[in-house]
Image (cartoon, rainbow, N blue to C red):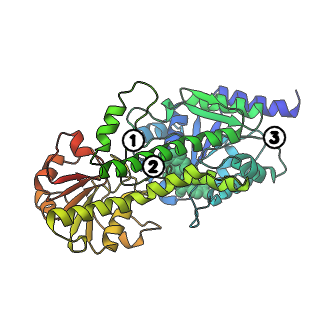
Amino acid sequence: MDARSSTFGTLSKKIETRTARAGIIGLGYVGLPLAMAVARSGFAVTGFDIDPKKIVALDARRSYIDAVTNEALTAEIDAGRFSSTTDFAGLADCDVIVICVPTPLTKHRDPDLSFVEATSRSIAAHLRPGQLVVLESTTYPGTTDDIVKVILEGTGLKSGSDFFVGFSPEREDPGNQHYHTATIPKVVAGDGMQALSLMKSFYGAAVSTVVPVSSNATAEAVKLTENIFRSVNIALVNELKTVYAAMGIDVWEVIDAAKTKPFGYMPFYPGPGLGGHCIPIDPFYLTWKSREYELPTRFIELAGEINSAMPRYVVGKLAEALDVRAGKALSRSRVLVLGLAYKKNVADIRESPSLRLIEIIEERGGKADYHDPFVTEIPPTREYQALKGRQSIDLTPEAIAAYDAVLIATDHDMIDYLTLLENAKLIVDTRNVLSRLGLSADHVIKA
Ligand SMILES: NC(=O)c1ccc[n+]([C@@H]2O[C@H](COP(=O)([O-])OP(=O)(O)OC[C@H]3O[C@@H](n4cnc5c(N)ncnc54)[C@H](O)[C@@H]3O)[C@@H](O)[C@H]2O)c1
C-alpha cells in the first residue's frame, strides 16, 4: 500500500467506524445545527468560533440558534460528543474539518472572502496528513479549489494525496418545521475521486440523502443557482404586484388560482423586499465572478433592482393611503411597523426590509415604531446604526389605536390579527396575511 492510499484508507475507515473527530468552524445558523447533526450520527465533534460569547453560552448549554434546542445541545454535550472552543490548536486533532464562516459582500458589493481566507490560514497552521477539509460557506464557483486548497497547499502538503478538500453547500431553512439539517438532501463534491468518496461517507452518516456532483465548482454553482432562482422569481412576482395593483387586480388572488395548475407553475409570493443572509447577497457572488469572463448577469441584476425597490414602493403606497383615506401626510404620521425579522416566526433581522422601511418612513418625516415578538430590541447593525437600541412596543389595543397606520412587514403567526384589525385606523398589508385569515376590511390595503 503506498502512502497515498494509506492516508485515504485510514481516514475512510475512521469515518466508516465513526471514530473520526469532526471540527466545525463557525458556530452560527449553519455551523451549530450541522455540529448537532454530525454529533447525533455518532462522531465526536469540536466546534470552533472566534466569538468567546458563543463558547460561553454553549458551555452553559444555552443555544442561541432557534433550530437547536437547549435539550438537544445538552444531550450531545452529556454524551461526550460535543464541546466547543476558541482555541484553534484543537484542529490538529480533527480528521474532518468543516468551514461554516460568513461570506458577506463588501461595501462595494464584491465578495468578502476574508473570513474564509482567515479560517483557511488557521487550518493551514495545524494541517497534517490524513485530514478532510470541507467548505460549506456559500460562494462563487472556484473558491474551494482556488482559495482554500491553495492556502492549504502552501504548507507543502498536497490535496488528493496528503489531505482532501471538498465542498458541500448548506440548505438550512430557518423556521421550516418540516425539514432540518439531517433530512435535507445534501450536495457533495470533492477535489478528486478519493475526496468525493470521503465526502459521501462523512455526510452520508449525518444526513439522509447525499447528492454527489463531479467537482467542487459544480457544487458551488448548485447553491448559487438555487438562490438566484428564488431571487429572480420573487422579483418577478414583485413586478407583477405593482402592475396588477395599477390595474385593480389582486396579485395574491392571481397566484392562488395559478398554483392550481398541476404542472409548469410554482408559486412565489411578493413582499416588502428581500431579506436574510442568503437571497439578497449570494446572487452577486456570481455576478462578480462572471465579470472575469466578460459576461453580463442581467437577470440577477434586474432582480436585485426590482427587489431592492420594494421598500420604497411599499412606503409610497402607505403615504398614498394616509393621504387619500385619512387626509394626513406621512410626514405628520406615526406608523407602527409590524415584524422586524425578515421572515415569519424567526428572530433573524439580517438584511431585513423592515429596517429599510423604518428608515424610509423617517427620511420622509414620519415617525416609526416597531413590534416584533421575536426581536425585543434592535441590535447593532452595520447599515442601520441610527436604529440601534430601539425597543419593540407592546401590542395593546390602546397602542395600536394610537398609530395613524400599521404596516405589516412580517406575518408572524403569534400576532393577534383580529385585535389588530379591530383597533388599527389603517393597515397596509405586504404579506396578504389578513386576507388569508379571512379578515378583510375597508381600512386594510395591500401593498
Ligand atoms: N443562515 C442560513 O440560513 C444559511 C443558509 C445557507 C447557507 N449559508 C451560508 O453559510 C455560511 C455561514 O452563514 P451563517 O448564517 O451560519 O453565519 P453566522 O454569522 O450565523 O455564523 C458564522 C459564525 O462564524 C464565526 N466566525 C467568523 N469568522 C470566523 C473565523 N475566522 N473562525 C471561526 N469562526 C468564525 C462567527 O463568529 C459566527 O459564529 C455563509 O456562507 C452563508 O452564506 C447560510
Q: Is mark 3 within 8 Å of ligand 1?
A: no
Q: Which mark is residue 303?
A: none
Query: Is 30 left or right of 270, judged from the image as shown?
Result: right
The quadrant where residue 413 appears:
top left
| Location of residue 100 in the rendering, given as x and y in whole percent from the top left corner | 58, 48
Query: Is 139 left or right of 416, judged from the image as shown?
Result: right
Classed neighbour count for the residue bearing mark 3: other residues with Cα under 10 Å, few (<14), some (14–19), many (≥20): many
Residue tagged 3: 162
Q: Is mark 2 within 8 Å of ligand 1?
A: no
For the residue labelled by badge 1, is the local secondary structure a helix, a strand or a loop? loop
Q: Disc 2 vs disc 3: Cβ atoms closer than 8 Å?
A: no
Q: Which mark is residue 235?
A: 2
Pick whichever, 66 or 373, lies toward us: 373
Badge 2 or badge 1: first in the primary sequence: 1
**Front of the two marks 2 and 3:** 2
Residue tagged 1: 69
* 123 versus 263 height, above or below: below
Could you tell me the amino acid type at mark 1? Thr
